[in-house]
Amino acid sequence: MPQIKKIAVALLVAFAGTDSVTALAETKIAPTITTANAEFVYKYLLGEIAGQRGEPTLASQLFLDLAQQTRDPRLAERAARAAVYANQPGIALQASTLWAELDPNSLEAQQASSQLLVVSGNLNQAKPHIQKLLAKEDTRANGFLYLNSLLANQKDKAEVLSAITEFAKPYPNLPEAHFAIAQAALIADKPNIAKSELNIANRLRPDWEMAAQMQGQMLLKESPEKAIAFYQGFLKQYPKANDVRLTYAKLLVNQKRYAEAKPEFVKLVESSNGSAEISAVVGLLSLESEDYVMADKYFQQSISSGFKDPDQLYSYLGRSAERQKEDAKALTWYDKIQPGEHFLDGRLSAANVIARSKNVDAAIKMLDEVDGLTPEQQITVIQNEANMLAQVKRNQESFDLMDKAIGNWPDSTDLIYDHAMAAERVGKYEIMEAQLRKLIKLKPDFAAAYNALGYSLADRNVKLNEAQSLLETAVKLAPDDHYMLDSLGWVHYRLGNLNKAAEYLRKAYEIQADPEIAAHLGEVLWKQGLTEEAKKLWASALKDFPENDVLLATTKKFNS
């Protein structure tokens, strides 16, 4: 009870204050409550208690009732906020409209009322409130930039364009007004109007980055080259336009023009006093372009500047060290990765380094000691261990590991596939076929399963009609996958369809110059009588892949 008394005293003082007297005197409708009488105190306290006890709907209703009776804008504001919190748009609309009426100088009241009117579909009723927002010179420019967001949910985009054009009419020399029209015109699919209004905005404010970015986006729809040329010209004229430079640099990355993008990001780093995020981007671009010294510099600079996810950068630094043949340094970076999102990836990367620099057993031992893994993570570890064993031709051990794992997780589609591949490597074709057929039933859109089974049948020269059907399904599911195309070409070779085989194999090799595809295509060419082309293809592939078993076996077979 003492707390309620304190609230009541504070309330009496506040309500009797000069501000509320002035506010009441300025309203057109006379209030029915002008003092903190018993009814007022009761409803106010009841509203406070309702809000404290998690009943915002009741609180909003009580405060709105009081606001209507007292004509006090502060109570209308309380009612509006409580109604929004309670997700009561009807009460919120009434309260915010009353708030804007009682306090016409409140920018927040005008924003709230206009937004709620627009959301309710009453664009015409919202117009006077929006016009009041735009009438204030100090907030007018930002008001126009806010308009399209405010009206984003209106279904009639032409009506929105018409309304914004109407709002902008009194301000012909305000670039933000023309920019708002241009935005609305783009949304309404009126590109000519958008271009015209954007040109006016640019003439009024030629160095405006927001308008430049919009113009670049419009040009990008025509062609990336036009957008790139525009950004280059703008940056030449306004070299400190960092927002435009960032947009330009991202566009270059999207176009895979990494060498051109990197110096732009470097300029951004220099101008932003070593922004952690931009430094990380420069590091990634440097890593992509194999400039490892610069990659290391900017990754470490980003970490020093407080990058929010340093473990991700430790992973990149480890990768950079690996590519520089510095395995010890790579392990140092991977060991810095803390338990969390990137921890297991770091352990797997470290295991690959250990397997390469020491031995597979040491790598597997390290992975087996990683604790606290989810079942999905345990499966990932087992898959990687089996793969490491397979890479050093310890195929039986790889199969045994997968065979044990499949007993624990018999319906894991990833494990079923890897178990099948491990079975094939040790010649257990019945297990391989059974697992792949099971996988196809469990996951009928898993293209790799159709491909693996179809290719195995074709390579062993058995059940060729079924193999063709399986591989045609694989290609339908993944039409641009070079492995699938290679397999389909190979089954056509087995069936004696040399022209069809060559067609698929050439297409596969164009997508990816893989050594096994080169071996298959060369064999088909040889059978077609194109022996010189086959030899040339094999020689070229051997330069890049001198140790590939399939390629070596094929060239030996035909050159012996």
Image: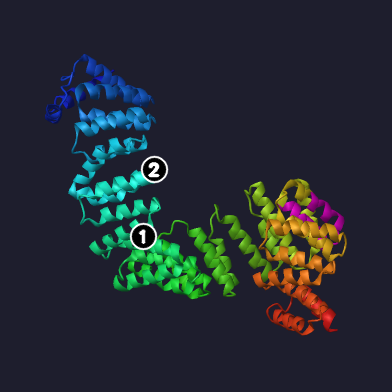
Name of the residue lying farthest toward the top: 38
Disc 1: which residue: 214
- Amino acid type, mark 1: Met
Can you say which quadrant of the picture contains the N terminus? top left
Indicate the quadrant where residue 546 lies.
bottom right
Vertical comparison of 381 with 288: above or below: above
Compare marks 2 and 1 and give the one earlier in the sequence.
Answer: 2
Q: Is residue 444 left or right of residue 335?
A: right
Q: Quadrant of residue 227?
A: bottom left
Position in image of residue 327 (x %, y %): 60, 71
> Where 486 sits versus 551, above or below?
above
Quarter of the view holding residue 329: bottom right
Closer to us: mark 2 or mark 1? 2
What mark, if any, has residue 120 been given in the picture? none
Highlighted magenta segment, given as a residue range: 414-437
Q: Residue at x 15, y 20 (%)?
A: 34
Position of residue 349 measured from the top left corner of the image (x, y, whole percent): 61, 63
Within 10 Å of disc 2 (Cα), the crowding (few <14, some 14-19, many 20+) is few
Can the viewer see residue 272 in this picture?
Answer: no
Most foreground residue, 13 or 244: 244
Residue annotated with mark 2? 156
Disc 2/disc 1 C-alpha distance (Å): 22 Å
Residue 187 showing in the rendered view: yes
Residue 31 pos. (x, y %): 17, 21
Residue 376 included in the magenta stretch of the image: no
Quadrant assignment for the C terminus: bottom right
Mark 2: amino acid: Asp
Above or below for 241 versus 447: below
Q: How is the image coloured?
A: rainbow
Q: Is residue 494 left or right of residue 41?
A: right
